[in-house]
Image (cartoon, rainbow, N blue to C red):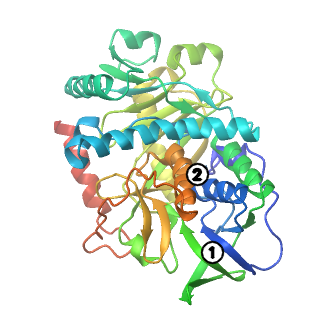
Amino acid sequence: MQFKSYWHDTAAVFGQAAKGPVEGHYDVAVIGGGFSGLSAARHLAKSGVRVAVLEAHHVGAGASGRNGGHLNNGIAHSFLSAKNELGVERAKALYRAFDDSVDTIERIVAEEGIDCNFRRSGKLKLASKPAHFKSIAANFEAVNREIDPDTALLTAGDLVGEIGSSSFHGAMLSKKSAMMHMGRFVTGLADAAVRHGAVVFENAAVIDRKIANSRHTLTTTRGSLTADTVFVATGAYTSGPFSYFRRRIVSVGSFILATQPLTDAEVEGAMAGNRTCVTSLNIGNYFRLSPDNRLIFGGRARFSATCNQRSDEKSGAILKAGLREIFPQLANVGIEYCWGGLVDMTKDRFPRAGFADGVWFAMGYSGHGAQMSTHMGIIIADAIMGKADRNPVSGLEWPAIAGHYGKPWFLPMVGFYYKTLDRFQ
């Protein structure tokens, strides 16, 4: 078993990073070489803006290259609960933004000719308990009537042709959802940004920033540059001189396995519907097939903000047991990849984007960001250029988390709380 991201290992390496020291002056400096940052850089560069991307490691090193490969439309929350928390109009705007985000990726893939196996697969939100199906059915009724008719409610009997597991009691199908190869997309997005004129610096972590006379000076591990405007798009991997955001983001580990390629018979017996799937437990699982028919199976196996081989190994054992429970017929299938990544959670699990602490930002996607991050990069790029405000979370309050200064010491207690909820609800 290899302890590295399947997406990284099976994609071409980005080869157009700038050589030499970080230096020069730019209209916009983008911090973070993931989907948000690269999407913004591409969009800005296409408009003639001089833009530099500062990435601490390599493009896609963070969440953009370590996720489950889902591009799910709609809100991760119940639409009913989102209406209660955000109000009807904000909830609808956010729901539509997630829909638009999948369209955005589909358009970029076509415009730039990115070979990343993009496919409109549909998503199944699977009910892990009978009571969960009642909640899913109530949410479906509201979604289907008010905002998204491209949805369907499936009974346990309907799932027979979709998924080879007796673990579920029905599901909601969101037909607009998609999937793609995340590593190939992030490399293609970086290539496109450079092709349109952006400069991408890798291994250039920002360690200091200063503002004087409306000009930002960003010091990195490879030198310094200046910029008129800064966009922070680092999510769960936010570090350096950005404590404002670290106090509002909780970085939580999410862990993933990839099996060996399944046979045609194994695919038909386990994932005949070939959709993205998410279970309804608070500490649940998400899974899909890869382009080469591996089962990619993930979840928050442990509430930890540590991702290294040791933590991946522990979490991998938990995930393997979960995979066997859902798909006992795959119990003897080999596991070839195991990796972890950090998810940038907000307290209410809604994303945040806008302008604060002297910089533009987009983050807090809370495990539902592979699609929204690309879309928000474009929305913030437009805002930087003074275009119409299309930000679905513009002005949404974002207080700091009490007692949180960067390291989420409270995660074990949060994990215990959600495990308890899953036992009794």
Sooner in the amino-acid sequence: mark 2 or mark 1? 2
User: Is residue 312 visible from the viewing direction of this image?
Assistant: yes
Q: Position of residue 90 (x, y in %)?
A: 31, 46
When asked about the image quadrant of residue 139, the answer is top left
- At horizontal 35% and vertical 23% (from top left) the residue drawn is 172
In the visual, does 233 lie left or right of 366?
right
Farthest residue to the bottom: give it.
212
User: Is residue 1 visible from the viewing direction of this image?
Assistant: no
* Mark 1, secondary structure of its residue: loop
Q: Is residue 75 above or below residue 415?
A: above
Q: Which residue is mark 2?
A: 64
Can you tell which mark lies on residue 205? 1
Q: Position of residue 49 (x, y in %)?
A: 69, 65
**Structural crowding at the residue carrying mark 1, measured as other residues with C-alpha within 10 Å and reported as few (<14), some (14–19) or many (≥20):** many
**The C terminus lies in which quarter of the figure?**
top left
User: Residue 19 or 227: which is nearer the viewer?
Assistant: 227
Q: Position of residue 19 (x, y in %)?
A: 83, 72
Q: Position of residue 123 (x, y in %)?
A: 45, 27
In the visual, does 114 lie left or right of 39?
right
* Mark 2, secondary structure of its residue: helix
When asked about the image quadrant of residue 218, the answer is bottom right
